[in-house]
Image (cartoon, grey):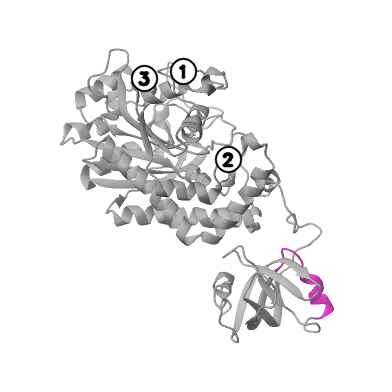
Amino acid sequence: MFNKRTRIKDLLSSSTTGQETIVMGWVRTFRNNQFIALNDGSTNNNLQVVAELGLLDEATLKRITTGASLKVTGTVVPSLGKGQTVELKATTIEVLGDSDAEKYPLQPKKHSLEFLREIAHLRFRTNTFGAVFRIRHALAFAVHKFFNEKGFVYLHTPIITSSDAEGAGEMFRVTTLPFDNPPRKEDGSIDFSEDFFGKSTNLTVSGQLEGELGAMAFSEIYTFGPTFRAENSNTTRHLAEFWMIEPEMAFYDIEDNMNLAEEFIQYLIKYVMEHNADDLAFLDQRLAEEEKQKPQNERQEFGLLEKLKFVVDNQFERITYTEAIQILLDSPHYKKKKFKFDVKWGIDMQSEHERYLVEKHFKKPVIVTGYPAAIKAFYMRLNDGCEPGKETVAAMDILAPGIGEIVGGSQREERLEKLEARMKDMHIPAEEMSWYLDTRRYGTVPHAGFGLGFERMVQFVTGMTNIRDVIAFARTPKNCEF
């Protein structure tokens, strides 16, 4: 069997010596024709392979270059060098794949994140992206573990859909009709009855509406899948294709919803702190070095590990939207006109407002509830007893240091007549949503749910400042490489 190998992570974590073993990986560096730093992606730590002088012929020595892949058989021996307890004394070295050192883009030096984005197919081999994507994996696993332990049903909601869950209209159309000459109706509009699905369809912006259908039978469900927004936002916070985690729970109110979301975030962070300590330590050090380059007044108050520990150890602050606006209006930041966007009751708070509340005022994650109905989606439950013109909904956003909103959710409107009236006000055709309204016609119950942008969560846990650096192949305006 060819793949009878030991992972480098397992080898380095064991202090047992004297056994023969096989390792495979890629060369990071090769010194003095004798010392090979080998890495197989299981850890950022390299295994030192010692090739005694005379073991390899001249032709093989020339092929051991940065990026080349090797199969090494040897004996595990105590290491005399710093940084590792064991190393491998090679008995045979086989070059599996050559790498032209002159052309290989990842030389053993520091590369900028901008440069690495241009070679995203190779950036996994760097320490930074090795750490980021092992943490991304751990977070994804922890998502399923958390909900499975709570008895939730994992529901696969459709990627191709005919509904617009957010009412935003920023969707990617799915069609088999010819672009140059689509069939048209008498009024000149495109005749989608001749399309593959017989109607206009698009890539999903959210699995929530379908998720609610599942919650009305299973009580608690969650979705975890890709979602798509055709939003022309070329920023460090937006992607056109991203992953969303969306639990929906029957018999939950807004407070139950907040409790679950807070517990969920803390669980994910704890899991990574326990299982990816080496990767977090590396990213913590990386962020600290990055912060040193900034002026004192722009530096973050916490290091990465400090920030994560703080979120895990402290209850989130809970305030209403009205209280949040008042805090912003009373802030020195507002009085000195440091906000780019205006502050008044009724606005959809911008990232700068959210980050001020979290990073400057409360200095911890904040849950904001009771948003104006006018800026929120049709399915959010109208709060009772509101002043005319100041109607609010049972919505909640969780704001996190460094990135602003990380979770958005609400108690859903379970009252049929209220939901129908809201849909009418927002020009959402009730006849097309009859299937959704059936959940309110037949055994309606109080229910709630939220959405967690997975990439935002990975950003938060890794300390990466650009969302394009926490997804393998970013999809952004004018960019669909690989």
- How many neighbours does mark 2 have within 10 angstroms: few (below 14), some (14-19), or many (20 or more)? some
Sequence-first tag of 1 and 3: 1
Q: Which mark is residue 188?
A: 1
SS category of the residue bearing label 1: loop
Sequence-first tag of 1 and 2: 1
Q: Is residue 61 magenta?
A: yes
Where is mark 2, residue-wise? 300
Q: Which mark is residue 374?
A: 3
Image point (30%, 39%), residue name: 257
Going by the numbered disc 1, the residue's amino acid type is Gly
Image coordinates of residue 8 in percent, x first then y, are 59, 71
Magenta stretch, residue numbers: 57-69
In the image, is residue 120 above or below residue 16? above
SS category of the residue bearing label 3: helix
| Residue 124 visible | no
Do callouts 1 and 3 mark residues in contact (Cβ within 8 Å)? Answer: no
Disc 1 from disc 2: Cα separation: 56 Å
Disc 1 from disc 3: Cα separation: 34 Å
Image coordinates of residue 163 in percent, x first then y, are 37, 32
Going by the numbered disc 3, the residue's amino acid type is Ala
- How many neighbours does mark 1 have within 10 angstroms: few (below 14), some (14-19), or many (20 or more)? few
- How many neighbours does mark 3 have within 10 angstroms: few (below 14), some (14-19), or many (20 or more)? some
